[in-house]
Image (cartoon, helix red, strand yellow):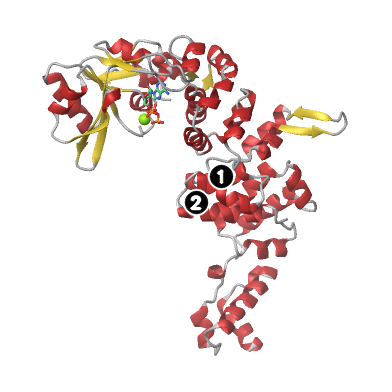
Amino acid sequence: MPENTLSKTHIDIPDNVGFIIKTLEDKGFEAYAVGGCVRDTLIGRMPGDWDITTSALPHEIKSCFRRTVDTGIEHGTVTVMFGSESYEVTTYRIDGEYRDNRHPDSVSFTSSVREDLRRRDFTINAMAYNERTGILDLFGGCEDLKAGIIRCVGDADERFDEDALRILRAVRFAAQLDFRIEEHTANAVKRHAINLQAVSKERILTEITKLICSAHIERIFDIFELGLAPYISEHFDEINISGLKELITAKDTTEGHDRYLSAEERKAVENAFDYEKTTSCELRFARFAMLAEGMEPEHVKKMIKGLKPDNDTLHNTEFLIRLLYVPLSDDRYELKTQMTDVPPKLFYCLLRLKAVSCRTKLYKERCRNEKLENVIALYDDIMKTDEPIYLKELAVNGSDLISCGVKPGPELGEMLKRLLDLVYREPRHNDKSFLKEKALNIL
Ligand code: ATP
Ligand code: MG
């Protein structure tokens, strides 16, 4: 985080948000940008959406803007539309009693912004901003943001007792922001883990997906360490997290009981995700696949579909999972033939995925003879020497061969493959005239 980010009292807000705030203020109401957008802007992260909190009542909000939608009007939320852009504007609110560990029985409106900020989950999510006031931070959100801490607003036990979804939100924000969950908050998470039973499967799915797609998938370990795993797997028959569990508990055969991975082993698992080198999209493929690790491929599709990825992600993830248990060779020629059918970026993902999965029982069973360390070293070497792997890297193409007399069609494809095979064995033969001559000899 840039050193001085949090000391500035001005933040750049989108024009529409500024307009909404100003319009409400001109009518005599208070209005602020609030929650995630303030948090994200302060740490230089792109906010997902901009929410506005105001002292205006829902009907008053509606009277200020031309196009509005009654999104959750009974809870005070009106959506204000500008073209295709929309913003949720919500009346300052106090939540009533929570009797089901999830939803307040009632909400009431208040004229106090303090009350509205107090009902919010974490200090870093309980800050508001407008140009008049600057940052309104009544619960130490800025300090926690600087220190990288997730801390409940008020008494953590009470807050998780009210709404168990906050338990998963804590873990998810910790992963997205790479923050630490403050001790009282973490202990309260553990004490209220059982309340996750009150959270719907869809909401759990959303939070887990956000965690998996964050830059710190290794924070999935928090789910085990905080005792949340049993309640999540209970909701998700389709999501088998036993593969992940195996990553953190490895059988100690000498003593015959489970033990946790040592710090070094765990680091190795974490390092297997090399964030710099992998684009976020591929990382998602690998993460979905990793979550599914330990499952049979036919179950995986259903599970991944449940996470609602786009078609490419779905396709590539399935592809990775199918390849996960295919042992790779540490013979140079063999490895190149294995690489040829896998797009380069996916092959890199596959190695990452194998590196995190290779400790699991299923993997050890299926890839018994694979020497992954040698494979990775060999792969690095092949990449360094820039040897041709794919047909498009061959010095001759289809039309070159047609000009030598090869017939278009299957024969042509076959010939290209034979030439590529030749180049696998002898990379220096990747030369147009040499390969053309070879083709003529073969014909
Ligand atoms: P993101 O949109 O990146 O997931 P966010 O912080 O904006 O993060 P939202 O779910 O959009 O999260 O909620 C907006 C704000 O509403 C939060 O910042 C927080 O202040 C408040 N909030 C959301 N869910 C809860 C909850 N379960 N309990 C208390 N406050 C909540
Ligand atoms: Mg949001």
Mark 2 CB lies closer than 8 A to ligand 1: no
Circles 1 and 2: CB atoms closer than 8 Å? yes
Judge by depth and name the residue closer to the eye, 74 or 410: 74
Residue 165 in percent (x, y) is at 48, 25
Horizontal side, residue 90 vs residue 125: left or right = left
Q: Quadrant of residue 56?
A: top left
Q: Which residue is mark 2?
A: 313
Q: Amino acid at mark 2?
A: Thr
Q: CA distance from mark 1 to mark 2?
A: 9 Å
Which element carries disc 2, helix, strand or loop? helix
Which element carries disc 1, helix, strand or loop? helix
Horizontal side, residue 251 vs residue 86: left or right = right
Judge by depth and name the residue closer to the eye, 11 or 195: 195
Q: Amino acid at mark 1?
A: Phe
Q: Residue at x 56, y 87 (%)?
A: 406
Task: Please identify the residue farthest to the right as the structure is shown.
Answer: 254
Horizontal side, residue 25 vs residue 263: left or right = left
Is any part of residue 4 visible from this angle? no
Mark 1 CB lies closer than 8 A to ligand 1: no
Which class describes the residues within 10 Å of circle 1: few (<14), some (14-19), or many (20+)? many
Residue 343 in percent (x, y) is at 55, 59
Q: Which residue is mark 1?
A: 288
User: 429 above or below 385?
Assistant: below
Picture quarter with the N terminus: top left
Is any part of residue 370 visible from this angle? yes
Residue 105 in percent (x, y) is at 38, 18
